[in-house]
Image (spheres, rainbow, N blue to C red):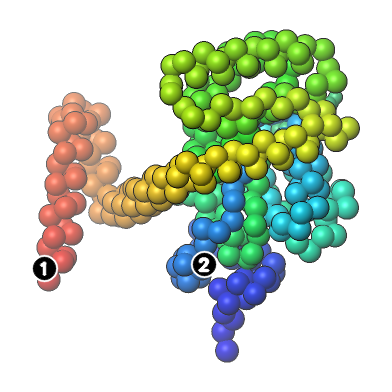
């Protein structure tokens, strides 16, 4: 008899979850049958994003935060989205947490994911892994990601509460963060507060938040938490801030609204990914892509007309297939 992965995951089998996640990472079609079965059982877990520059202390914070959360009995899933960055000496979250006693706790599940090589996009793969951990019974899923590129910002779009980790001594840290990343933060963490310049950075962040509050009428004012992750300082405060943001979302109705928008984005992203895959496959197989490139290189056509023609051709082909 074949294995019912969905049933096993719903019963809490981490082995079954690991298998399904591997299929998701390999974009193996077998994953989707089980994902479809799990979908009705998802949506329960609260999702926290921890983002920031390479080496800011995200993994250390996640490790310490997880210990605090576990005290309340909540089950935690952790996804470390690793951009395989060569710039930092920071340990992979998986390694860091595995080194600590957290690794013996059966109610914690840790998974690292590389961001390279996903045709369908890292954000989609991450969103799928969140769903698996949710179905596995985790109450809270933490996603650690480096907030540098658009892809990472998309990943953070998956979180209910996004924590942005800043550190003193990186020059004008706020200015250098990619535009848009300040806006998505619900909680700011000034980590490595044992280093010089922490107070100044807190001040800068606070005034930025104040200016922002004037521009965009938001009911939630992002708190700024000062932390020294390696010394376990500020972690309880961080957890309280996350909890109060959660309460704000629930009380204001934003929790539902945000998730509705996320579901809409995810659906569009999936349709986009699948359409692109199918069209591309066909264009490559029937030689149409090569022919188009040839025309463009010889200036026999232009990309605007060609794009229009290809889409129209493709639509009529699918119409014909539908009719036959
Ligand atoms: N002084 C000081 N060092 C810290 C603090 N928090 C973390 N570190 C150190 O900073 C380094 C990077 O920490 P990580 O937790 O791996 O940082 P990260 O943001 O996860 O790094 P990447 O995942 O590589 O981007 C490690 O050597 C930590 O021990 C802190 O509060 N103060
Ligand atoms: Mg890390």
Mark 2 lies within 8 Å of ligand 2 (Cβ measured): no
Name the residue: 52% across, 67% down: 41
Name the residue: 20% across, 34% down: 295
Lower position in the chain sequence, tag 2 or tag 1:
2
Name the mark nearer the viewer: 2 or 1: 2
Residue 119 in sight here: no
Dot 1, how many residues are within 10 Å of its Cα: few (below 14), some (14-19), or many (20+)?
A: few
Name the residue: 55% across, 59% down: 44
Does 195 appear above or below 161?
above
Going by the picture, which residue comes out furthest to the front?
A: 251
Q: Quadrant of the N terminus?
A: bottom right
Look at mark 2 in the image and give the residue it sits on. Answer: 41
Q: Quadrant of the C terminus?
A: bottom left
- Work out whether residue 105 or residue 199 is closer to the camera in this orientation and state it: 199
- Counting from the top left corner in percent of width and height, residue 235 is at 78, 36
- Work out whether residue 283 or residue 321 is closer to the camera in this orientation and state it: 321
Residue 247 in sight here: yes
Look at mark 1 in the image and give the residue it sits on. Answer: 323
- Counting from the top left corner in percent of width and height, residue 62 is at 74, 41
Name the residue: 14% across, 46% down: 312
- Counting from the top left corner in percent of width and height, residue 242 is at 65, 39
Task: Locate residue 324 relative to residue 105 in the image: left or right.
Answer: left
Task: Locate residue 225 relative to residue 322 in the image: left or right.
Answer: right
Task: Locate residue 174 relative to residue 250 in the image: left or right.
Answer: right
Contact (Cβ within 8 Å) of mark 2 with mark 1: no
Quadrant for ligand 1? top right
Does 139 appear above or below 181?
below
Q: Secondary structure at mark 1?
A: helix
Mark 1 lies within 8 Å of ligand 1 (Cβ measured): no
């Amino acid at each position: 008899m074949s294995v019912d992965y969905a049933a096993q995951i719903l019963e809490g089998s981490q082995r079954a979850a690991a298998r399904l996640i591997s299929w998701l990472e390999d974009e193996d079609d077998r994953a989707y049958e089980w994902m479809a079965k799990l979908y009705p059982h998802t949506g329960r877990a609260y999702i926290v994003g921890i983002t920031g520059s390479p080496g800011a202390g995200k993994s250390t914070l996640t490790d310490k935060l997880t210990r605090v959360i576990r005290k309340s009995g909540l089950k935690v899933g952790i996804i470390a989205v690793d951009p395989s960055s060569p710039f930092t000496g920071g340990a992979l979250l998986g390694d860091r947490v595995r080194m600590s006693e957290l690794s013996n706790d059966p109610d914690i599940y840790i998974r690292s994911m590389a961001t390279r090589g996903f045709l369908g996009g890292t954000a989609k793969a991450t969103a799928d892994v969140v769903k698996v951990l949710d179905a596995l019974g985790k109450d809270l899923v933490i996603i650690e990601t480096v907030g540098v590129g658009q892809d990472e910002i998309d990943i953070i779009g998956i979180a209910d509460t996004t924590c942005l980790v800043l550190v003193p001594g990186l020059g004008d840290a706020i200015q250098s963060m990619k535009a848009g990343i300040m806006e998505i933060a619900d909680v700011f963490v000034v980590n490595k507060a044992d280093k010089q310049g922490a107070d100044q950075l807190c001040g800068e962040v606070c005034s930025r938040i104040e200016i922002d509050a004037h521009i965009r009428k938001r009911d939630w004012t992002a708190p700024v938490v000062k932390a020294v992750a390696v010394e376990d300082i500020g972690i309880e405060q961080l957890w309280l801030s996350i909890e109060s943001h959660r309460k704000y979302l629930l009380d204001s109705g934003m929790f539902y609204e945000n998730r509705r928008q996320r579901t809409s984005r995810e659906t569009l992203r999936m349709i986009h990914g699948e359409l692109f895959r199918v069209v591309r496959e066909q264009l490559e197989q029937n030689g149409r892509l090569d022919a188009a490139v040839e025309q463009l290189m010889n200036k026999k056509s232009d990309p605007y007309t060609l794009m229009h023609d290809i889409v129209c051709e493709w639509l009529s082909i699918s119409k014909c297939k539908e009719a036959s």
